[in-house]
Amino acid sequence: MASDQGLASATDKQLACQAQRGCQASFEQLLRRYQTPLLGFLRRQGPAADAEDLLQETFLRAYEKLDAYLPRWAFSTWLFTIARRTSINHHRRARLDAEAAGVENAVASGMEPIDELVIAEDRRRLWDVAGEVLSEEQVTALWLHYVEEMPVGEIGLVLGRSRGSVKTMLFRARQRLMPILGEFDEGGRQGGDANAPGRHGDKATEYVYE
Amino acid sequence: MNRNQPTKESTLRPRGLDPLADRLRQEAIETWPRFSESLHQRVLEAVAERRAEMPPRSASSASRIRRPRGLVSLLTAACVLCAAVVGWRVYDGRIRAMRNAVIEQHVGDFVTQMVSHWPPTDWAGSDDAENGTASVGDLICSGGLSSQTDHLADDARSAADTLLRRLPIDMELAQSP
């Protein structure tokens, strides 16, 4: 249908403005566009089992607050801000509930040193380690920067931080992950070639953020 | 960033310049969720339920809420400030008018009192002498009249000082040479 083609070619801002005027099809198109980016993001924020519920909650909140969206913001920035806050609130409540119920943190009790985990488990992912050694803000900044390719200024809006603060956050996150990346590569490629990525401990200082 | 395509492979291709970024992007691709129509329908149903609970969204309500709140607050504050200034000016004007009326009344009473007491009784008594001219001459020579006029001058000075202290500044300035 022509209208479907129009919706598919419309920008996020156009769709959001139409949805503000009551166009349900525009909001549905936004749901379709942002399902997988938000789901991937929310899986990095906490247990993957909660991600779908958090996705639904994020879209519900976005729908409720749609009138508050201003076209001068990127819609993705606005939506990821809602998603992050929803996720933080959810996981904080879950943690408090667990503490109140006296449930021991099974992950913490069974934790092995990170270095051993990195070397021993080849299938382990760098993002998992990042989630353990970095703060929630740093992981979010890394995800938005490298996966969503969001500009530093917009990451600052999502995190409620200045551009300089986000740059520092990304720099420190890279500094922390670079040695771990080297161990990942050594563990996965014993006796690998000299050009193999991973021996780049000083790359954190060379990277320039846009 | 083109979000029309749900797949991420086209935009997150490793570029070989930054190994950490490449690794993070590669892992993101490997774990990238697939678009789920059932999840989409589930979210749509939840939104529809929420929509039923909310008042209908319309263009007018959207534009009304999107009106810049800062500007409205600024205009409200300006209106309140203007009302306060106007009210203060009106109140101050009435107070000044009442004070001027009281001062005029006091000045009028003072002048009336001064006129009614003129000439002084001592001086009138000296006029009763049969040889009035000589008596007045004696009075001047003896300094009796001088002391009476000095007394009146002192009264006038003190009255003027009192009056000046009561006068508003603008009236005082207008009267000064």
Image: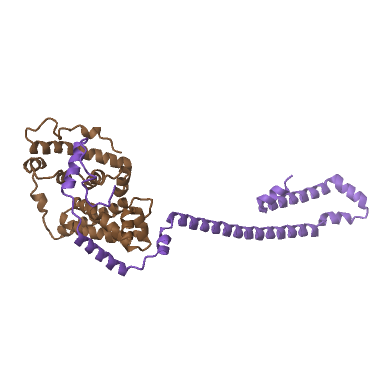
Toward the bottom, the furthest residue is B52
* Residue B164 seen in the current view: no
Name the side, left or right, on which B160 lies relative to B52: right
Residue B51: image quadrant is: bottom left
The picture places residue A41, in percent across and down from the top left corner, at 22, 51
Colour of chain B, in one word, is purple
Name the side, left or right, on which A4 lies relative to B123: left
Work out whether residue B77 or residue B28 is closer to the camera in this orientation and state it: B28
Quadrant for the N terminus of chain A, please. bottom left
Name the side, left or right, on which A18 lies relative to B104: left
The picture places residue B30, in percent across and down from the top left corner, at 15, 47
Q: Residue at x 11, y 55 (%)?
A: A104
The picture places residue A77, in percent across and down from the top left corner, at 31, 50
* Residue A58 seen in the current view: yes
Image colouring: by chain
Quadrant for the C terminus of chain A, please. top left
The chain coloured brown in the image: A
Q: Residue at x 27, y 64 (%)?
A: B47
The picture places residue B70, in percent across and down from the top left corner, at 44, 54
Q: Residue at x 41, y 58 (%)?
A: B66
Work out whether residue A13 or residue A25 is closer to the camera in this orientation and state it: A25
Q: Residue at x 36, y 63 (%)?
A: A22
Work out whether residue B156 or residue B131 is closer to the camera in this orientation and state it: B156
